[in-house]
Amino acid sequence: MSLKLIGFDVDGVLVDSFPDQFNYFQKCCKALGKKFEFNDLEEFRTAYTEPVYPNMYTLLGFNWDAEKDEIWKIYNEHKANSKIFFVPEMKPLVLELDLLKPQLSIATTNTKKAIDKYLTENDVANIFYPVITKEDVPLDENKNPKLKPCPDCLVVMLSKANVSSENAVYIGDQVTDIEACKRVKDVLGMPLRVIAYAGPSSFSTLEKLTAANPDYIAKTPGELAKILKGLVWIISS
């Protein structure tokens, strides 16, 4: 067994976008006449649920199918003007891992436009391959992309990288990330190991992530770095 690929979720792991997500949902609710009843980030984090569409929108009183065109318009306009930065400790970790030579990849439910903007503005666009976004996954019977906890984005990532699930690990900050990694077994015969990231930028809480039984859990960027570098040296040796 060797570690050939490290896959990353982006929002809440690599970039600190949760405050911007809070602001976006406030704006979307105001624009479409819905109540936004969360007073701060911690209240919002506790309630936050995925798949974001439709689950989070349903929680906030939207009718996703009827309102999604207007929602996407507000989302794209908001994200085009957002400034999202890497979690300070994550960029040097990514650069160090890149030197150690496991392949670094991304699998996210966010849009290609948003992810390209994040990576370009943070000068890391050339480090990750493949970069799997919402546009790269198959559609369900309602013509919506099959987002996590469906394993499709992870299966596509592994396929494009030409790496087996037993030779990879994925870092995510949501229960749906953990569920999707386990469900890779249904497609490829072997689950994808998962590190649950419960750091300050995470979209989820430590309690939720722990209850989902990930292979590893990191509560800080330093803990994540220790786990990842340990896997690179130990598993690849």
Image (cartoon, rainbow, N blue to C red):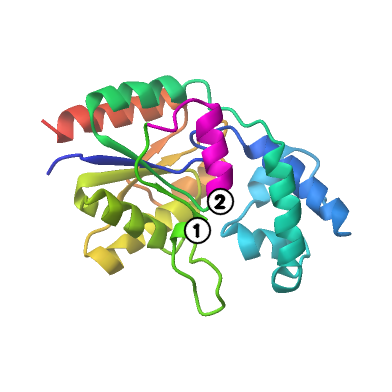
* Residue at image location 52% in from the left, 21% down from the top: 88
Quadrant location of residue 124?
Answer: top left
Reading the chain from its start, which is encountered first: label 2 or label 1? Answer: 2
Relative to 71, is 226 on the left or the right? Answer: left
Q: Is residue 24 visible?
A: yes
Q: Which residue appears at 41% of the width and 22% of the height?
A: 222
Q: Is residue 35 visible?
A: no
Q: Nearer the viewer, residue 213 or 103?
A: 103
Q: Quadrant of the N terminus?
A: top left
**Which label was assigned to residue 83?**
none
Of helix, strand and loop, which one carries label 1? helix
Give the residue at mark 1: 135
| Residue corresponding to mark 2 | 111
Report the Cα–Cα distance between label 2 and label 1: 7 Å
What amino acid does circle 1 point to? Glu
Image location of residue 6, percent across then percent down = 31, 39
Q: Which part of the image, by quadrant, shows the C terminus?
A: top left
Is residue 217 magenta-colored?
Answer: no
Residue type (three-letter) at the residue carrying disc 2: Thr
Q: Is residue 8 above or below residue 87?
A: below
Q: Residues within 10 Å of mark 2 (few under 14, many from 20)?
A: some
Query: In the image, which residues are magenta?
Result: 110-126
- Asked if the stretch drawn in magenta spans residue 111, the answer is yes
Which element type, helix, strand or loop, lies under badge 2? loop
Q: Estimate the x, y position of residue 13 in percent, counting from the top left.
A: 49, 36
Report x, y in % for residue 59: 72, 62
Residue 120, compared with residue 66, is above or below; it is above
**Which image quadrant for residue 12?**
top right
Q: Is residue 64 left or right of residue 52?
A: right
Contact, CB < 8 Å: mark 2 with mark 1? yes
131 to the left or right of 208:
left
In the rendered image, residue 178, in percent from the top left (x then y), is placed at 41, 53
